[in-house]
Every structure is written in C-alpha cells, then in structure tokens.
Image (spheres, rainbow, N blue to C red):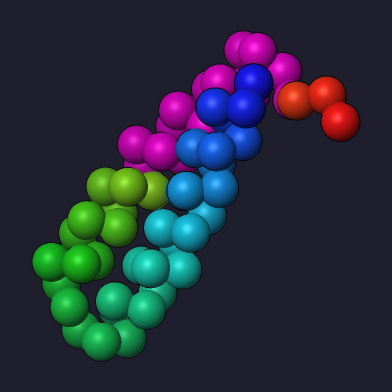
Amino acid sequence: MALGSITTTVAILSVFAFVRELKRRNFLGVGFSVISILIFGFFGIMTLFVSGAPEM
C-alpha cells in the first residue's frame, strides 16, 4: 500500500519536472519526465486501485 503512495508522489514530482524542463526547453528532460509520469502514474494508480488506499 505504501508503494502506491510512493509511486504516485514520484509521478506528481515528475509533473513539476516536466513543466520546469519545458520552460528551459530541455527536450531530453521533457522526454524523461513524460516517461516517468506515464510509468509511475500507471503503477501508482493501479496499486491504489487494486490494493486500496493506505490506512492512516
């Protein structure tokens, strides 16, 4: 369950990296951040969907 939270957090941070690298016009960084958003976002959402949200 913690894995879903961690991967979702990484996906959210990758969105900030995407915006920052787009402003700098660093297209290699944009590419890596898009790949990170897709991979970590998918795993984070599917982990939370299948296992449920962590208990607080």
Farthest residue, direction bottom: 24
The quadrant holding residue 23 is bottom left
Residue at point 24%, 66% (across, down): 30
The quadrant holding residue 29 is bottom left
Q: Nearer the viewer, residue 20 or 3?
A: 3
Q: Residue 46, relative to residue 40: is it above or below?
A: above
Spot occupied by residue 44 in the image (x, y as percentages of width and height):
52, 32
Farthest residue, direction right: 56
Q: Residue 43, relative to residue 52: is it above or below?
A: below
The number of numbered discs placed on residues in the rendered structure image is 0
Residue at point 83%, 24% (across, down): 55
Q: Nearer the viewer, residue 25 or 54?
A: 54
Q: Is residue 46 left or right of residue 49?
A: left
The quadrant holding residue 56 is top right
Instruction: State whether residue 43 appears in this view.
Output: yes
Spot occupied by residue 52 in the image (x, y as percentages of width and height):
72, 18
Please provide the residue range marked out in magenta.
Answer: 38-53
Instruction: State whether residue 45 appears in this view.
Output: no
- Image quadrant in which the N terminus is located: top right
Main secondary structure along the magenta-highlighted residues: helix
Q: Is residue 4 left or right of residue 20?
A: right
Q: Nearer the viewer, residue 41 or 54?
A: 54
